[in-house]
Amino acid sequence: MYDIPHFKASNHQQVIDFMQANPFVTICGVDANGLPVATHIPILMKVENDIVTISGHIMRKQDHSNAFELNKNVLVIFSAPSAFVSASWYSNQGQASTWNYQTVHAIGKLEMQDEQHLYDLLVALTQKFEADPEAPSQVKNLDPMYMHQNMKAIVSFDIVVDQLKHVFKLSQNRDEVSHTNIQNELNKGDAACKYMAAAMKAESGPKDSHTNL
């Protein structure tokens, strides 16, 4: 991953908050032939005594679930909307344009869990993402036979995170005028651009840098 010191969060809690705010992730692994596999799922995350655990469920008998059974080492990617940044918005325009983005890479081992874990996870996932606590889709309101049949096709997991890496590239290497111009121009754009402008505003602002992009 792109690893430049000034393209970082101000503190570790910002990284955790970002992960919590972006729970639809990409999980990457390697299959028996050494080829990459990936899947995209919503997850739950908990932090206890500085230990981060990521939990979710996947379909059985898929290329990714087969790979995760053989090789437990996985990479979980958390991401958010990103935006193109034109060099025409800089106070010094004789430079290359770039792209602003935020992403977190969580590395750990994926451990498949038992049926009770799966059931509890499905309850927790639905409670978190379903707005109405009494919705028909809440697990407590679903037919037990329906739950039993569908649970046969999926398996839950926990990933205890061994390493966390991140990039929060928010134009910290730009001067104040450029930083303000970038925010103003992004605020004229689509939802992703507006998201990035807000992320830049929330960050502390420019930092000294020798990196031009």
Image (spheres, rainbow, N blue to C red):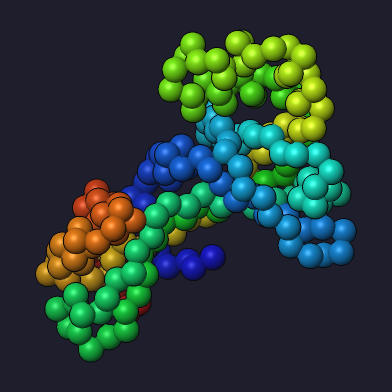
Q: Could you say which is closer to the camera, residue 119 or residue 8? A: 119
Please name the residue shown 56% across and 52% down the image.
77
Q: Is residue 6 visible?
A: no
Residue 8: image quadrant is bottom left
Say whether residue 209 is left or right of residue 117.
left
The percent position of residue 167, horizontal first and vertical second, equals: 44, 59
User: Disc count in the image?
Assistant: 0
Say whether residue 13 is left or right of residue 160.
left
Please name the residue shown 25% across and 51% down the image.
198
Please name the residue shown 15% across and 67% down the image.
181
Say whether residue 198 is left or right of residue 151.
left
Say whether residue 136 is left or right of residue 35.
left
Residue 115: image quadrant is top right
**Which corner quadrant holds the N terminus?**
bottom right
The percent position of residue 9, horizontal first and vertical second, equals: 37, 52
For this orientation, the residue located farthest to the left is: 177
Please name the residue shown 69% across and 35% down the image.
57
Is the residue 130 above or below the residue 86 in the image?
Answer: above
For this orientation, the residue located farthest to the bottom is: 94
Q: Is residue 132 visible?
A: yes
Is the residue 176 above or below the residue 57 in the image?
Answer: below
Q: Could you say which is closer to the camera, residue 155 or residue 11? A: 155
The percent position of residue 114, horizontal first and vertical second, equals: 80, 24
**Which corner quadrant holds the C terminus?**
bottom left
Q: Could you say which is closer to the camera, residue 90 or residue 37? A: 37
